[in-house]
Amino acid sequence: MEHRWLRSGEEHTKRISFGADYNPDQWPREVWAEDIRLMQEAEVDVVSVAIFSWAKIQPAPDRWDFEWLDEIIDMLHAGGIGVDLATATASPPPWLTLAHPEILPVTVDGRILSPGGRQHWRPTSAVFRAHALELVERMAERYRDHPAIVAWHVSNELGCHNAWDHSDEATHAFRRWLELRYTDIDGLNEAWGTAFWSQRYTSFEEVLTPRLVAAIPNPTQRLDFLRFSSDALKEYLIAERDVLRRVTPDIPVTTNFMIMEGKNHAAYDDWAREVDFVSNDHYRFAGDQSFDELAFSAALTSGVAQGSPWFLMEHSTSAVNWQPVNQPKLPGEMSRDALTHVAYGADAVCYFQWRQSLAGAEKFHSAMVPHAGADSELFRDVVQLGRRLRRLGEVAGSRREAAPVAILFDWDSWWASELESHPSTLLRYRRDALDWWRALADAGIRVDVVAPGTDLTPYVVVVAPMLYLVPEKTVSELTTYVEGGGNLITTYFSGIADENDHVVPGGYPGALRELLGVRVEEFHPLLEGEEVLLDGDVRGSLWSEAIQLRSAETQVLRRYASGPHSGEPAVTRRAVGAGSASYVSTRLRGRDVLDVAAELLTVAGVTSELPAEMIGTVFHSRRTIGGTAFDFYVNRTDDRVALPGEEPDLFDQRSIPPRGVAVVRRSGASLG
């Protein structure tokens, strides 16, 4: 299968691509030749160029300078290195913001953000868009036939710093978005519940973005603004993409998503439909579970890409520069992190950046060539990783094989469940999804992460933690899945509201009440640090409920053994058709999730595919192409782990080193 970021029909060697953001305009020309030589040594075959080069390319409104870019692209091509060419629109040059300060974003409290950082532009600004699209058009026309260009890179990390703009221009665009969504003002009033607090509108011109207000803002207004902001950025992405497709229809277009901890400004499952292949940036945060989050995010990126190969556009070789304390990676972690992304579907592994900057805000961010230069342990590790990726050429083009279990991840529920004025401010949607994913991985289970609307029939078990917003379509999909033999597990604060964030009346868990066969009259959230016990010495936190059984098919699996609802049901399971629907009414973590999940998985017939000695020590993922599968085993420990079977893996390893990865080829009967 051909890489989607190579031009149609282009001859190439099948491989996992390797590279980085490359910023030659930060360096004198005499460094460029050395860069290309070192790239060749490291097996680099693709670099992203010109991401932050607008001021260099267009130093004044009527001046253009492409000669330096022509030169470096020609040099890269001569060196056998493809170019993922950025449209250079990520940050406007000083002359543009001086001439047009009206493109600058406005914060929730009305402050205008100044230039001097990056992404200082409004997603809805017509002036910014006109200047940016002129640049895109000139870039596309100039490089449309250059053989080095393997893909277009639209802007950079769209919305990372400018997602939520409250300018008058954004307000006007928000009103038009609302008109399209609700048709008339009565529809908006109904959806927003404006009878509360005398908020009823008589025209769309009265509506504002949810700015700083005297009390709690309207929650549906907040939710719609988050949806609108994601759509506004997506509309900008489409505007650049359409210029590129018109001028260069044979060059694929992408932009780098940010599927990672702390980033929830864009509904990437929706954005994925607008690019030719999915790309993602991922950075680890400090903490003892940061690697688990990396693997979860890689699985979620694969879900957004619907199992197709994707492009890891950025991650770090070692330390970043933007955390309170920026620690380097331990020996083996750079390679392990990269190969884990490959395990979950990445067909390209790239870093920010190629050569570590000497000046600027990111000068202490690690790179492939560090300040210490090529004569360094880090660069030697980079070279070794490039050679390892080259050995995985036969994996390129393979798809992620559906796992037995999926986590259902919903951006609307993420946004809505963490709004103000809820029963608890301690709720964290993504954290709960990660808790379940980690526990299932601890049990040796392969787990996918998928978005609503994904075909669930391949999955024996689907876990939907804290699925707060549940439209009728989702209820229907989950019911059909369960009745057809699937096994649903959902948790507290699920099914509570419809797509307008209106509570479903009749008792909780609202829209899922009938499917689960339970009813709850009132929530009982727990204080921070407070815990309750369940049968079997299982601990719950954050939440508890008094569950009423409302179906003869609903059985109690665990009861509360302490707390306000001691003796009452805590975990239930209802047989439905050929499947089941289970409910967990408190937050479980670590071993406690595992204890409850193990019982539910056993009933569903899901067991680990791993040998007993590997359970709890490795993440397991599988990619397939034709009749061949590639099992990835990612060692999460500091100890060596034996490989199953007697044959070495694709790296000629017979065991997995500490913080290492093994890749085993299987075919035919060996896939069982």
Image: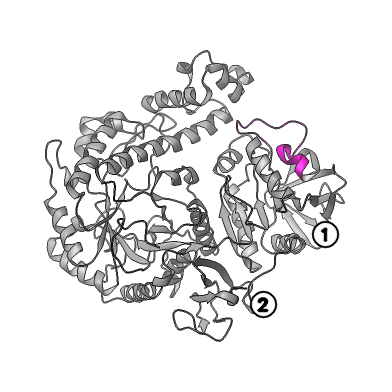
Name the residue: 50% across, 51% down.
304
Name the residue: 87% across, 51% down.
567
Q: Is residue 531 visible?
A: yes
Number of marks in the rendered image: 2
Residue 147: where, in percent of width, then height? 21, 57
Residue type highlighted by circle 2: Ala
Name the residue: 63% across, 18% down.
195
Left or right: 349, with 528 as reference point: left
Circle 1 residue: 535
Q: Quadrant of residue 140?
A: top left
Q: Is residue 216 visible?
A: no
Q: What quarter of the picture does the N terminus occupy?
A: bottom left
Q: Main secondary structure of the magenta part?
A: loop
Q: Which residues are magenta?
A: 497-515
Left or right: 379, with 612 as reference point: left
Residue type highlighted by circle 1: Asp
Which comes before the other along the chain, label 2 or label 1? 1
Q: Is residue 547 magenta?
A: no
Circle 2 residue: 612
Assign a secondary structure to mark 2. helix
Residue 286: where, in percent of width, then height? 48, 61
